[in-house]
Image (cartoon, rainbow, N blue to C red):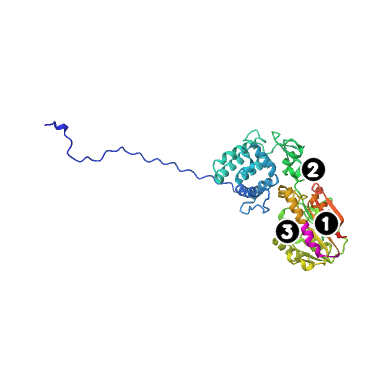
Amino acid sequence: MPHESSRKPNHRPGPRPTRPSSPKSKAPPQPPPPPLDRARDIVHRALAHQAERYPDLDLAPLDTSGLPPRDAAFAHAIYDTVLRRWITLGYLIDGFSARPFGELDARVRAVLLAGAAQLLLLDRVPPHAVLNEAVAWTKQVVKPEAGGLVNAVLRRLSELIYAQQQGLPDQKPSAPWNRERNQLPLPEGESIELRQPVLPEPMLERLAIATSHPPSLLRHWADAFGEPEALRLAEHDTTTPPTLLNTRFSNGPVPHTLPHEQPDTAIYTGSRETLVTLLDARPDIWVQDVSSTLAIASIADLTPKLIIDACAGQGTKTRQLARTFPNAKVIATDIDPRRLRTLREIAKIESNVTVIPPETLSTYRAQADLILLDVPCSNSGVLPRRVEARYRCDATQLARLVATQRQIITDTLPLLAPGGAIVYSTCSIEPEENEQQLEWAKTLGLTATRTHRTMPAGLPGDLPSTYLDGAFSALLSRT
């Protein structure tokens, strides 16, 4: 018999023993991302919208209604600086980016533009705070891997100003503006001095980048007016334009103002809120640059009975017409419904103004003694006030505007009464929109009997009393 010990157990085997299991490992919970800076978040999102539209920027103002006043002011400072210096900032970013600036995601372009504006052009913004907020926003809103690009580019840009990231002085290095390759001009006449000469060598292109103009626009001006004048115009456009009031029809002293070199014009020095209150209380004054007044002032000796303001816009010249010719009936219209609403408010103030929809203009066929055509234009004479307009000033847009202006003249000519005249007006300095249009108007039997051209005046650091917008006007009569 086999040995007992060799026998197999005569019972069902039990469950196999198992090793004691260790608790299942779980990844520790990740802390939520830090909250984004609200002011910068609003700016980044608004600039991303603009980057998608560039160069045809949206004219709607930045909405900071949900921010405390100090944060709102900071947001506007960043946003307004970017709009004024878009080409400058984009050029500098492009020099430190592995990918062309124009090919980057619109949100990445936005955060880079905002960061560059703070680092290079705004005072008392710590560089480390700019970098931290920009990278955090990019990682949360765009994608984490994009944060590295933003960090690298902004660090390189900060090195154009500072030698270190911490413990930095409040004031950026500055020097008088001398058109050097390492200078960015400021509205006050000084310049931010960079640690490297990064701007282009050719002077025309250098000034275009430094003052945030398309180089093609400065070349166009150089062809029309000569290179020295083109450079001067570029520098003029970096100024901060004063708020000017038309006081020609004022009934008394105007508070919060200083005199301008030109008569019947005052420089407003108070706050925006006070200005709104002042204008509501004083219908005898309104905001209008000196150059804008000249189109109507130049024909004040005429005695029209019926005036048609066919492109009335916001109604600034409509009010001037009403006051200059109090015995005339002024018919005002505009193709924009929002502007028509503004004109109707003006008609409540000026009793001799009647506002009509543009489609009813034909009822005044052969009745107008005077027609004002303040036509849509490139705005090249008012670029300090219309900062977005410079980015779309090109040959294509100019050709489109010239065609529109000619169509407006052609369409309104039948409204002219025998012996009547047309005032053709622009806020442009382009010969194509001004003198060349007068030559073309001869084909319609119209001759310019009075012509006024005003070139922009006032450079960074100059007194506000010397400032002028650019404008053009001519009185056209049938030959």
Give SS at disc 2. Answer: helix
Q: Main secondary structure of the magenta part?
A: helix
The magenta segment is 406-418
Mark 1 neighbour density, 10 Å: few (under 14) some (14–19) many (20 or more): some
Counting from the top left corner in percent of width and height, residue 204 is at: 76, 39
Q: Please give the residue where the numbered disc 2 appears in the rendered image.
A: 222
Give the amino acid type for the residue marked by disc 1 in the picture. Answer: Ala
Which mark identifies residue 277? 3
Determine the CA span between mark 1 and mark 3. Answer: 43 Å
Give the amino acid type for the residue marked by disc 3 in the picture. Answer: Thr
- Is residue 17 visible in the rendered image? The answer is yes
Counting from the top left corner in percent of width and height, residue 46 is at: 63, 50
Give SS at disc 3. Answer: helix
User: For the C terminus, which image quadrant?
Assistant: bottom right
Residue found at x 77% / y 58%: 407
Counting from the top left corner in percent of width and height, residue 143 is at: 55, 44
Which mark identifies residue 441? 1
Which mark identifies residue 468? none
Q: Disc 1 vs disc 3: which is toward the camera?
A: 1
